[in-house]
Amino acid sequence: MPAQTTTPVATAIPMRVLAMWALAASTFLYAFLQRVSPSVMVAELMAGFGVGAALLGNLSAFYLYAYAALQIPLGILFDRFGVRRLMTVSLLISGSGSILFASAGTLELAYLGRMLVGAGVACSWVGALTVAAHWLPASRFALFAGLAQLLGMIGAIFGQAPLAAAVAQYGWRSTLIALGALGGAMAIAIFAVLRDRTIAIGSTTRLADGIRSVIRVRDTWACAVFGFAMTGPMLAFAGLWAVPYLMTVYELPRTQAAGMTSLIFAGWGIGAPAIGWLSDHLGRRRLPMLICAATAGVLLSAVIFGPRWPLWALGIILTLHGAVASAMVLTFAMVKEHNPAGASAAAMGVVNTFVVGSGALLQPLIGWLLDLGWDGTIVDNARVYDTLAYTQALTPLPLLFVAALAAGATMRESGHARAR
């Protein structure tokens, strides 16, 4: 989310506009709820489809494959078809995909269902920002973008302990069917409440020109690498493998393991707006990014390679890790400020593709590494991995923060940030 200089606006925002934005932004909550849902049903999915960790990681990542691939094209589609119709259709697709996934009897159908879920909610972040850009005062855009990010983290938290309790009570298939029905209900609400406002923001040709100019800027790629490296551990660890890891290493029941995992998302939700404000206040991007990358790497290393922490200490470490890793949001401000105003949307789209794509790559990679370390233990038709297997499989994640530091070191401080 880009940092922007704002001026006070006395005019009150109409309640209908606030309702439209809140409904559009709530789809980002739904997107994160769907994104992390496999993390609390790992054993059930392995047993239900007879797969190991590698295939399960790939199954979960199909959501991210579709989501990442659609980030840049969605800008064109929103301009052409409007937010109301596109988000309505998208949520219907996502809800249908969830129901297909829940009822799938084969792995192939499960792949298709998970892909449809991701494709359907790919509109959530872009849709919320488009509604904000079209209907809200420009001076409040950054505030409402930050609130949308907070809603996403709330969705991730609900996707941990509360969803784990639902899976335990009703089973994973019934729970996913309920999520599908929720998507359908949100689609109806979107169609009833949202209205489109036609704003000329450029043609398809201009967007293509913008993308070509963006990829020539060195800092675009440094921001993309930084965003990939900072977000990947959250999407791969907290988004899928943290719950079974904590169940194995700390011998926690699933609901408690999910609750501990949700602390990472809580840290992100708190840290993202706080770090964004601090960066604006200091007028610097690069230094906070470097400090946060180093700190996040140390904290995650303490979880993976450190001793078996007391749960209170583990909770603090996980929360702080999420808070400092959320400095990823500064990449959107940085890349916007390093590219011409006419190409800023394309620049953020490129970075966001890398950000979301990190989970698509790392979730199945960790699963593959888990399978390499598997000792052959099976319980209730599901593979069981020991502490050593998890440690070896999760080793690449702290190394990503080294890549983030390297990328941050090559960045130039943006002129807009220095001028604040």
Image: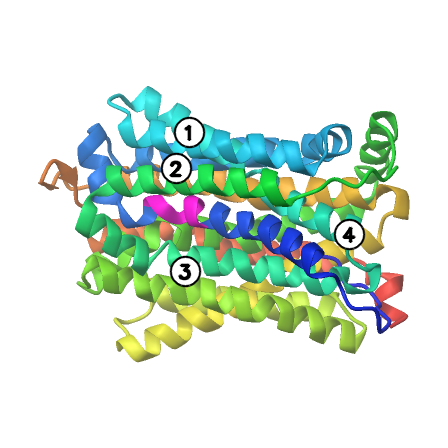
Which SS type dominates the magenta stretch? helix
User: Which residues are the magenta region?
Assistant: 33-38
Q: For residue 300, say whether it is visible.
A: yes
Residue at screen point 47% across, 28% down: 116
Mark 1: amino acid: Ser
Q: Which residue is mark 2?
A: 180
Q: Which residue is mark 3?
A: 157
Q: Residues within 10 Å of mark 4 (few under 14, many from 20)?
A: some
Contact between labelled residues 2 and 1, with CB atoms less than 8 Å apart: yes
Residue at screen point 52% across, 33% down: 120
- Give the mark, 1 or 3, whose residue is nearer the N terminus: 1
| Residue 114 screen position, x and y as percent | 41, 31
Q: Which residue is mark 4?
A: 135
Q: Nearer the viewer, mark 2 or mark 3?
A: 2
Judging depth in this view, the residue of 310 and 140 nearest the camera is 140
Q: Nearer the viewer, mark 4 or mark 3?
A: 4
- Give the mark, 1 or 2, whose residue is nearer the N terminus: 1
Q: Is residue 412 above or below residue 79?
A: below
Q: Which mark is residue 96?
A: 1
Q: Nearer the viewer, mark 1 or mark 3?
A: 1
Q: Is residue 151 above or below residue 98?
A: below
133 sits left or right of 65 in the view = right
Instruction: Quadrant for the C terminus, please.
Output: bottom right
